[in-house]
Image: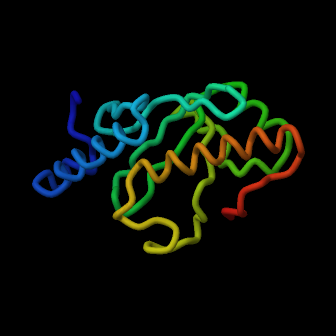
Amino acid sequence: MSQMPNWVARKPERYLKRLRFESNMLSEAFPAFRLMTEGDVLFAEGAFFTLSGNRYSIRAYYPKDYPYSAPQAFVMDEDVASYCSHSGNGFHTYGIQEEVGGLRLCLLDPNDSAGQGWIPDFSVVTILNLAAAWLHAYEVKRVTGEWILPEAH
């Protein structure tokens, strides 16, 4: 990593250990994903293959106050972003985020307080598991018109 992530730089004596934990968890759970940085922003990047054989590029960005807030997951595929943006509601996204260049997924209830939807003991693996479930629900909705996951908001 070229530069220390913003949340690690805040308290390196404490968060360098957390960064190693994140890296280990990610490589065990999702070996195709890598931790990367843009400036002082850390993100996990990789691809998922769904049960139907489709490949999706995903990025999960760590917030500045990590681990007290959840990483934000984005689908980086233009076709998914375009379809969700132009086909109406029901895909549980926050829309295309131009600064990232992807479709931000709604994976946790934004009204949850700490300890309900997200707790600091979770890792980026939690968010990537939810993103994988979101991708499956996306494919099901495209075929059936029904969203199969619980409402996040």
Colouring mode (rainbow / by chain / secondary structure / one colour): rainbow
Residue 56's x, y, as percent?
61, 29
> Which quadrant of the structure image shows residue 132?
top right
> Which quadrant of the structure image shows residue 68?
bottom left
Residue 53's x, y, as percent?
68, 26
Residue under the image location 32 percent in, 32 percent down: 37
Left or right: 4 in relation to 13 = right
User: Which residue is the extreme one toward the left?
Assistant: 13
Residue under the image location 65 percent in, 33 percent down: 50
Image quadrant where one finds the N terminus: top left
Front one among 38 and 17: 17
Q: How many discs mark residues in the rendered view?
A: 0
Left or right: 92 in relation to 114 = right
User: Which residue is the extreme one toward the right?
Assistant: 144
Front one among 100 and 125: 125
Residue 84's x, y, as percent?
76, 38
Left or right: 8 in relation to 83 = left
> Which quadrant of the structure image shows residue 61?
top left
Image quadrant where one finds the C terminus: bottom right
Q: Is residue 4 above or below residue 108?
A: above
Q: In this view, does 28 lie above or below 12?
A: above
Residue 59's x, y, as percent?
49, 36
Residue under the image location 38 percent in, 53 percent down: 123
Residue under the image location 85 percent in, 44 percent down: 88
